[in-house]
Amino acid sequence: MTDVRAPETDPFDPATEPDDQPRPGPASPGGGAFGLTDWLKWAWRQLTSMRIALVLLFLLALGSVPGSMLPQQGNNPAGVQQYFTSHPALAPWLNHLGLFNVFGAPWFAAIYLLLFASLVGCVVPRTFRLAGSARTLPPRAPRHLARLPRSAEYATALPAADAVEVAARVLSGHGFRLRRPVTPADPADPAEAGHWVSAEKGYLREVGNLLFHLALLGVLVSVALGGLFGYKADRLLVQGQTFADTASALDEFHPGRFVTAADLGPFTITLNKFDASYISSGQQRGQPSAFDAQISYTEQPGGPARTGQLEVNRPLSVDGAKVYLIGHGYAPEFRVTDARGHVVYNEATPFVSGTSGNFLSDGVVKVPDAQPEQLGFAGVFVPTAVDVGGSLESVFPAADNPVVSLIAYAGNLGMNTGAPQSVYQLDTSGMQQLTANPQVLVPGQSLKLPGGRGTITFTGYVPWVSLAITHDPGQLPALICGIAALGGLLLSFMIRRRRVFVRAIGGIRDRAGEHGTTVQVGGLARTDASGGFEAEFAVLAAELRSAHEQAAAHQPAAHHQPEGE
Amino acid sequence: MLSPVLRAPWSRAPWSRARRRTVILAAAVLTGVLLVVVLMTGWAGSGNSGVTAVDGNANAVVYAAGHRPLAPEFTATTLTGSKLSFSSYRGKVVVLNFWGSWCVPCREEASTLAAVSAQYQPSGVSFLGVDVRDTAASAEAFVHSFHLTYPSVSDSSSAVTLDFTAVVPIAGTPTTLVIDRTGHVAGAVFGTATYPELTAILAKVTAKAGG
């Protein structure tokens, strides 16, 4: 009784049919008079086809690959510079292709917009078709139910009309949508003849399907919102310093397409105190145990000052933006006097820890206004210094025994003309090295520069934090749409559209010579679902049978009038 | 295998030769559409009315009367430690230069500013520096190096910059604003200011009696 075959076309989904069957009009621009409108129509049909959508989705994924493999201007401009120096031949070509700014590149935007157009073009007509299909009644029962993938047949003593009535009650109780023959029967329409009921269920599948597509569209819109109206910025803030959320006070500022410097939130943040604690013994020695940045901030210029706390993964929400604590380090303080005895430099200079661990940090001090010559220092800050065979190593990240080691230069820093410089790099090409070996200083100690050029004093150190400021108006919508897409996908996976037909044929004389009715039950489910309909149908068929038996048992025995068929 | 959601509406028979030709054509058309989109992504903000570029440089502009934003009031401390209120400049043309001793283009334009201030101060134009993200020692050394004769206020917290960013799109340091006698921003140079740019803006702003 079971012959599971996939139907050639999906009889369930009217939404699929227009796509699967050749449409009227020219299908391809092969020959004949193919006008501009035909071309446009054809191009639109191609663009909105699933194949092109998948190709675009694939391209989008492929396009993102260089974004993660190559350093990007957005998050790693130093890495880009590094790449240019290490690959002088290749880098300019990659740059022409926009591979150092993949997510801002026109070709990436093109893929994105095309995918968007493709999805819109696919989802909008589909929405109408699905909405229509959700309202339509199931088809009339086929004449030969035994030919359906699932079928059952049994006899009952009930008259055909009553048998269908009972079946309809059972199916309706299972949440099926029913269709009965029109009454009075139209003799001209043989399909309406007889006693039958069609039942269909699983419309939620289409709802899920639609939800998935719409939510996918929503995700794209949300990401676009974030890209167009959001911004990302970084700022390194030394303890005691204040900064305002304005382009010139930010170290890095990456505005969305429609964001200008004037759109930044006018908040101000001061780092009052930063503490990092580390585990001091055991296997985990040197691992951070807590970070705590005490800040005060104002949301508006002249507004009330509030205090707050920044911890890793606990950002501060201020004026629509989120401020994340993403790093920290040490800023040794130096005072430099020049040959005339003028203090020409007196500040905390952020040093950045490299890969060597325990916050062994590198940094430079540039004194462009020292007279008679500009001074520069390349330094290393060692928070807990230990002399290992003549070289300094840091054995613990906390500043338990801080020292700096400096190499002094004099000459031209290259800062009076030319390209902007990184504050972490010293261009020594126009400079003369003053000290042969790195000079080690402890806090309070000074180094006299040879030739009466002046003095540098290591006066102390303070911590710094690096903050990431992001404003992404698309974040919440993207989350909601993501959840909706998942929900829709689950619905469409878990729910099957399935149809059950019951046809009762009366006036059959059985072996005992009694008048009886034959009940035929047929079932059909979407074949691409993961099975389970066989069991459901078997249960349903058994239930129908027992309902019929019960109904027959309660029937008054006198009721033996043959049906008029 | 594709999910039923993705597969159902689009599943088709294997490609015939005609279909393959269709796909090649589709690729061609797509490439065309891509090109159009690439060209379209070059659209950015269109021009603002009331703003004229000066000396052929879009970064040096003069705002037409009626399009001049009102400069904010501020009070700050000068590098020499005295209080300075911006309102005391009302009635004068002011050149307001945002700078920092660490900033290469600022160092590049410093001698220009020294020269222009020497030329225009006698005729009643005031010059005021706003020292951004700097320290007193470095800032004073800078002022000495470039022989600047006009005062600067310290803006290490960027508070003054923030106030001005609300009315003029200051995207970085240096920025030079020219404020007219009524306290409105009449001209601006975003980036390194050159002698021709500054003098051209000043000529326009000082020329108009009430301007």
Image (spheres, coloured by chain):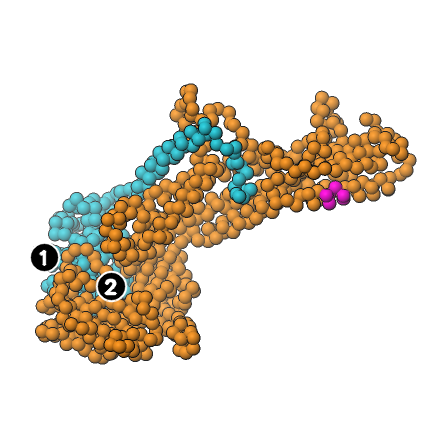
Chain colours: A orange, B cyan
Identity of the residue drawn at 32% across and 54% down? A71
* Amino acid beneath label 2: Tyr
Reply yes or no: does residue A540 show up in magenta. Answer: yes
- Which image quadrant is residue A521 in? top right
Q: Secondary structure at mark 1?
A: helix
Q: Are marks 1 and 2 in contact (CB under 8 Å)?
A: no
Chain ID for label 2? A
* Magenta part, dominant SS: helix
Give the magenta-colored segment's residue range. Answer: A538-543
> In this view, which residue lies farthest toward the right?
A558
Q: Which residue is mark 2?
A: A424
Report x, y in % for residue A41. Answer: 44, 29
Q: Label 1: chain?
A: B
| Residue A160 picture location, percent across and down | 80, 33
Q: Quadrant of residue A397?
A: bottom left
Q: Nearer the viewer, residue B144 or B4?
A: B4
Find residue B89 and name its label.
none
Relative to A211, residue A164 above or below: above
Task: From the top left corner, tell me how far across and down residue A26 is, in percent.
Answer: 46, 24
Depicted B208 relative to depicted A417: above or below: above
User: In the rendered image, is residue A493 in sight?
Assistant: yes
At x 62%, y 39%, the residue is A526
User: Where residue A467 sits: x, y (%)?
Assistant: 35, 63
Which residue is depicted at the point 61% across and 34% down? A7
Q: Label 1, on which residue?
A: B115
| Identity of the residue drawn at 81% across and 31% down | A506
